[in-house]
Amino acid sequence: MQKRPILAFDARAHATGIGRYSEQLLAGLRSSLPGVEIWCVAHPDHRSKLAAFADRIIPSSAAMYSVAAQATIPGLVRGATLLHCPHYDIPVLYPDRMSVTIHDVTHLLDPAFRNTLKSRVFAKSLLKIAVAKARRIITISQYSKRMILEHLGGSESKISVIHRYASPIFTPMPRHEAKVIVRRELDVCRDYFLFVGSPKPSKNLPILFEAFARLQSKHHGAIELVIIGNDKKNEPSLHTLAVRLGIDQWVRWIDSVPDELLRACYSGAEATILPSRQEGFGLPVIESMACGTPVICADAASLPEVAGGCALLFDPSSAEECGVQMSKMIDSPQLRGELREKGLERARQFDAAKAVAGHAQLFTELLAS
């Protein structure tokens, strides 16, 4: 009996955005690769959640981007036909067939990261090695593909663009019902704008805060700004800025929420705002649109590509432009209605089945080569 090919998947980054990508993909691959044995390298705390998607769970407590991971991962997946790393933290000494997903090269592009020792020595080196060693590279937008080629080199033919997509849970909820849930669960009692994501420097929250301060001077505390996500390193300076701008009492910080509550948060918002200077994709754009909520985002990086003309854009260096777009959203129910319909149609273009099929085809080719 011929042995089944084995796809090993490094799923250690489970509690992150890459973790969401990995879990969604593994769930789809389970039925899309019926003749393939799937191994998952996973933290012991996550093995039960991932067990449904794999034939074998390989426990590993090695932290991401650690010496321990570099030393142990090659041995843990020995015997696999193909190793897929859904991040650039590849095992550099792994001698066999490998593919990698590079979501973005923000660490090389954003000023807050690119001049750090960690970025120059670690991130850039690993990214270059990943591009050189991988048989195929998956990325999540045409923008990210251009940046990989421009800053890391490699062959264009090795890079496949497979877009992200919103989880099926993100569907429209009646706005009144959503606001009742958000009020009950999070004690947000006013109308609000929403930001979803880790507030790292590349997310450009100072511009959003300045724009929100301009808006508050006009609306006198009638609007709140809800931040869902955390970054303990950068939050203190953002809290200080909110106090200096006089908006601290109207900015709500929420570390995380389950997807069902996040759906309500999107559905009840005036708009979701992404002021980022760098994004490999910008998943909250599509999640918000899938919930029928308008989007305001920076005219930068991948965001215009993903928004596809269905969001209000602004210069990411201009708090004034951001504030103008926020005011438009409040003042024009007609505009909100138009963007809602456009956004729903746009979100439908980012299809889960299509994305899984793209990955499955690529893995099938590599497993057979």
Image (tube, grey):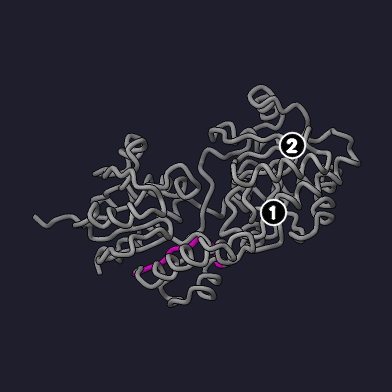
CB contact under 8 Å: marks 1 and 2 = no
Q: Earlier in the sequence, mark 1 or mark 2?
A: 1
238 is higher (above) or lower (below) than 317? above
23 is higher (above) or lower (below) than 357? above
Q: Which residue is mark 1?
A: 204
In the image, 219 versus 27, the foreground residue is 219
Residue type at mark 2: give it: Val
141 is higher (above) or lower (below) than 146? above
Per the image, is 136 magenta?
Answer: yes
> Looking at the rendering, in which quadrant would you find the N terminus?
bottom left
Q: How many marks can you see?
A: 2
Q: Which residue is rendered at x = 30% and y = 58% of the image?
A: 83
Q: Which residue is rendered at x = 51% and y = 43% of the image?
A: 167
Per the image, is 155 magenta?
Answer: no
Specify the segment rendered in magenta.
Answer: 135-142
In the image, 227 versus 62, the foreground residue is 62
Q: Report x, y in % for residue 224.
A: 77, 35
Find the residue positioned furthest to the top. Answer: 184
Q: Which residue is rendered at x = 27% and y = 50% of the image?
A: 38
Q: Which residue is mark 2?
A: 251
